[in-house]
């Protein structure tokens, strides 16, 4: 398998299209014939990342890379950044507005979910500049 | 439990996916919190929810939910149904509340997801 890379632009507050990138990612992985367990983990992590970009960021991108050993998801945005990343990673911590909660988000479970779905998870955030997340899911025999 | 039996027990109406009514679901999960759905659901699951926005279908798609049962008589818009059809999901609606629907289905043998 050659390395494959797809880029998706994610707009702030675009609830109409929110989830389309993750849906495309899921279809791509299916076409590659990966096993349903890893597809699920990637799809869930990508979707949580995509929703965070729509809800909390000024917009950004989701990039997926597939090589023979792993699937990597990059979620990068243009700010506003996270003040306390350690706190943001805690289950239940959320700054989502009431409007967002009414839509079913804001449980404060997204970042912990992303970490759980990944074999390797890293997050870096710089105030005013942006948040940069890298998630790796390693392919095992049979994936 | 088969979707068609679930339908009968909670007097549900089919909004789309009537061709999938013979599908067997192993578990059910009831929530209006999408991140919880993503965290808990593990395949072959019926999702019970009162939320009717497109994100419910997207969430279900990512979590491999096989069917959605809207409670409290909720009926989503056409865009939501179209999205469910694109994803080959059955969508049902019942007048019962989340609690009552869950109680009926549980007593009929449909179990919830246990955290590991
Ligand atoms: N890309 C981002 N830019 C700025 N802040 C973010 C970003 N992602 C997350 N956050 C902050 O971290 C908090 C926790 O994020 P997390 O995804 O865990 O929960 P949530 O999005 O609030 O709720 P849920 O994901 O359960 O719907 C958010 O409420 C927000 O304050
Ligand atoms: Mg989130």
Image: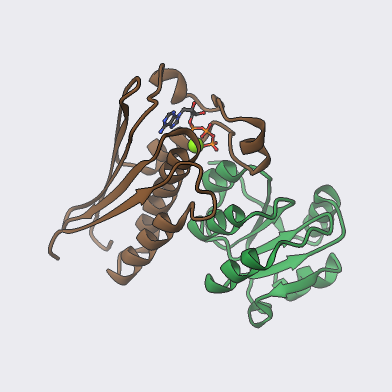
Chain colours: A brown, B green
- For the N terminus of chain B, give its image quadrant: bottom right
Where A140 falls versus A77 (above or below)? below
Residue located farthest toward the left when viewing the structure as drawn: A2
Q: Nearer the viewer, residue A32 or A11?
A: A11
Residue located farthest toward the bottom when viewing the structure as drawn: B19
Where B57 falls versus B81 (above or below)? above
Q: Nearer the viewer, residue A117 or B86?
A: B86
Q: Nearer the viewer, residue A65 or B7?
A: A65
Q: Percent position (x, y) of residue B64? A: 51, 61
Q: Percent position (x, y) of residue B55? A: 58, 53
Q: Percent position (x, y) of residue B63? A: 51, 55
Where B51 falls versus A30 (above or below)? above
Q: Percent position (x, y) of residue A18? A: 49, 51
Q: Residue B45: name its quadrant.
A: bottom right
Left or right: A41 as drawn, with respect to A95: left
Left or right: A42 as drawn, with respect to A134: right
User: What residue is drawn where x is 47% and y is 54%?
Assistant: A19
Q: Nearer the viewer, residue A95 or B70?
A: A95
User: What residue is drawn where x is 65% and y is 36%?
Assistant: A99
Left or right: A115 as drawn, with respect to B61: left
- For the image shown, how many numbered marks are present on the structure? 0
Q: Residue B70: name its quadrant.
A: bottom right
């Amino acid at each position: 398998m050659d390395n494959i890379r797809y880029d998706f632009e994610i707009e702030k507050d675009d609830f109409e299209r929110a989830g389309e990138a993750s849906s495309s990612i899921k279809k791509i992985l299916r076409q590659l014939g990966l096993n349903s367990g890893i597809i699920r983990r990637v799809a869930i992590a990508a979707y949580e990342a995509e929703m965070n970009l729509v809800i909390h960021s000024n917009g950004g991108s989701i990039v997926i890379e597939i090589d023979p050993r792993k699937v990597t998801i990059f979620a990068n945005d243009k700010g506003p950044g996270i003040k306390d990343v350690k706190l943001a990673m805690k289950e239940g911590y959320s700054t989502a507005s009431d409007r967002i909660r009414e839509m079913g988000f804001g449980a404060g479970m997204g970042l912990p979910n992303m970490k759980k779905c990944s074999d390797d998870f890293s997050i870096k955030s710089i105030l005013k500049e942006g948040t940069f997340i890298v998630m790796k899911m390693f392919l095992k025999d049979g994936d | 439990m088969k979707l068609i039996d679930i339908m009968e027990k909670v007097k549900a109406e089919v909004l789309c996916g009537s061709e999938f009514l013979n599908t067997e679901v192993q578990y059910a999960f009831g929530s209006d919190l999408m991140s919880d759905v993503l965290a808990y659901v593990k395949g072959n699951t019926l999702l019970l929810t009162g939320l009717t926005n497109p994100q419910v279908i997207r969430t279900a798609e990512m979590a491999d939910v096989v069917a959605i049962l809207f409670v409290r008589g909720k009926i989503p818009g056409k865009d939501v149904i179209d999205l469910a059809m694109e994803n080959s999901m059955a969508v049902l609606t019942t007048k019962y509340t989340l609690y009552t629907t869950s109680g009926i289905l549980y007593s009929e043998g449909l179990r919830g997801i246990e955290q590991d």
